[in-house]
Image (cartoon, rainbow, N blue to C red):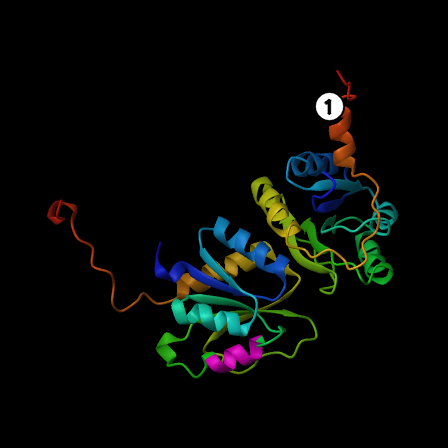
Amino acid sequence: MRLENRILVVDDDDAIRALLRTVLRRRGFQVDTARNGVDALDHMGARRYALIVLDLMMPRMSGYELVAQLAEQPVMTRPRVLILTAAGGEPLKVHTDMIVGTMQKPFDIDLLLDTVAGCIEAIPAPVATEVSVPVSTRPN
Amino acid sequence: MKDEPRVLIVESNDVLRVMLFTILRHQPVSVDTAVSAEDALKRVTSCDYALVLVDADMSDAVDFLTRFRDERPEATSFVIAVRDGRSDAFLDPEIVSAVLNKPLEIDTLAELVRECAVVVPPPEDPLNCPPAESDVRMQMERGPYIAN
């Protein structure tokens, strides 16, 4: 599994997190979940994610606040962010280099999966790649 | 069974409704069905559902969703709409959380129901639900209990 396949779903709704984890895993992605921005930052401290699927309205630390914090990171290490938002929410029009798109709830699951797959595909290959050791040279 | 999360299928198409019921009754949930908005409204006002699966292509689907929101504002149900991919009917995000397109992928649907229904919090003041259709069916299939 490539590192670029790892996704973090951030939403305070337990059922939405369960739904996204289920459909994204079935599509072949590795998925972690977080219930708010603070929880998400904990995950991001331990792991790099190719894509963050992010709800905006959450307790403790909202999606707006999380995006503002991520924007302080060096450009090369920032994850891409796909925003999930309910109609009527304040649109996020800043940090457009990091935000790959916005989807309105209720989201179409097929469209969401295609969007995520498209985002992941569009991510440039890492500069440093893992060196594989030929089987014949591996120690017994 | 009584303690399992309860799921409601709202589907006017007989074949689809029976198919969905058959699939979901084999999951660890209790299942009821409704054939129309009226029928569905009776269900949701007499029982708390963790998950409601509603066919948004039904002519009265939006009517049901609106009345559900108005008559049970305290409901914690997670609502998934099922619809034709070409349909563009407005679905209120205050009621509907996600949309699945037809034709349904059965394994995905079953897993979604299993995973989502168990995490939906019960309402603070739950209704006293009648027995679920799936439980009644299971009881009938098992036959009467005969003590030795």
Q: Residues within 10 Å of mark 1 (few under 14, many from 20)?
A: few
Secondary structure mainly formed by the magenta segment:
helix
- The residue shown at (17%, 53%) is A133
Name the kind of residue labelled 1 in the image: Arg
Report the residue marked by disc 1.
B142
Q: Is residue A138 left or right of residue B2?
A: left
Q: Is residue B85 visible?
A: no
Does A64 lie within the magenta span? yes
User: At 51% across and 54% down in the image, what residue appears?
Assistant: A24
Q: Quadrant of residue B145?
A: top right
The reply, left or right, for residue A77 in relation to residue B24 is left
Residue drawn where x is 80% and y is 52% of the image = B61
Q: Residue B125 falls in which quadrant of the image? A: bottom right
Q: Is residue B4 left or right of residue A120?
A: right
- In the rendered image, the quadrant that contains the C terminus of chain B is top right
Q: Secondary structure at mark 1?
A: helix
**B75 to B106, vertically: above or below:** below
Q: Please give the range of residues in magenta.
A: A63-69
Quarter of the image where the N terminus of chain B is located: top right
Check the image and name the residue furthest to the front.
B148
Residue B20 location, x and y as percent? 69, 38
Of residues A120 and A132, the one nearer the viewer is A132
User: Pointer 1 indicates a residue of which chain?
Assistant: B
| Image spot of residue A8 (x, y percent) | 48, 64
Identify the residue at image location x=72%, y=51%. B50
Return the x and y of residue A113 as percentages of the image width and height: 52, 56
